[in-house]
Image (tube, grey):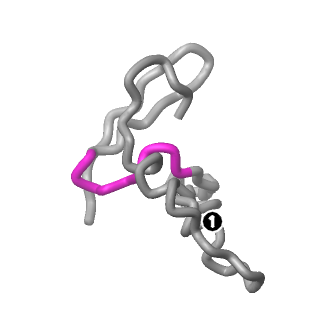
Amino acid sequence: MKSDVRVQKQDNAIVAIIPSNLAVTPGTRYKVEKKANGEFILKPSKKTINRLDDLFKNWHGCYQRATDLNVWENTKPVGKELW
């Protein structure tokens, strides 16, 4: 899928606005490569883990999810919690 993006200066950086219809998850980190012809290539460098189950997905030890985490994981912040 192709899309035109706008590039703008923000502080000491040049920022490209990525349209939401490209379904990029906020917080995803990318490696950026600039080609000789001026093209930029973005490649995800690290998957963002948002759930405890995903964190332990490839672990081969004995993991059993604590039942009290089910309520906590689906709770919305009510104050100034850090997320």
Viewer-proximal residue among 47 and 45: 47
Q: Is residue 37 left or right of residue 4?
A: right
The answer to which image quadrant residue 33 occupies is bottom right
Instruction: Name the residue furthest front.
Output: 68
- The answer to whether residue 30 is above or below residue 53 is above
Quick check: 19 left or right of 75? Answer: left
Q: Residue at x 31, y 41 (%)?
A: 5
Image point 26% across, 66% down: which residue? Answer: 1
- Tell me where residue 44 appears, x and y as whole percent: 56, 61
Which of the two residues, 23 or 4, is positioned nearer the viewer here?
A: 23
Residue 47 is left or right of residue 23, and the answer is right
Residue at 38 percent of width and 41 percent of height: 75
Q: Residue furthest top?
A: 11
Residue ID for mark 1: 55
Q: Position of residue 48 (x, y in %)?
A: 56, 56
Q: Residues within 10 Å of mark 1 (few under 14, many from 20)?
A: few
Which residue is pictured at 56% across the width and 14% down the height?
11
Q: Position of residue 13 (x, y in %)?
A: 58, 24
* SS for callout 1: helix
Stretch in magenta = 20-28
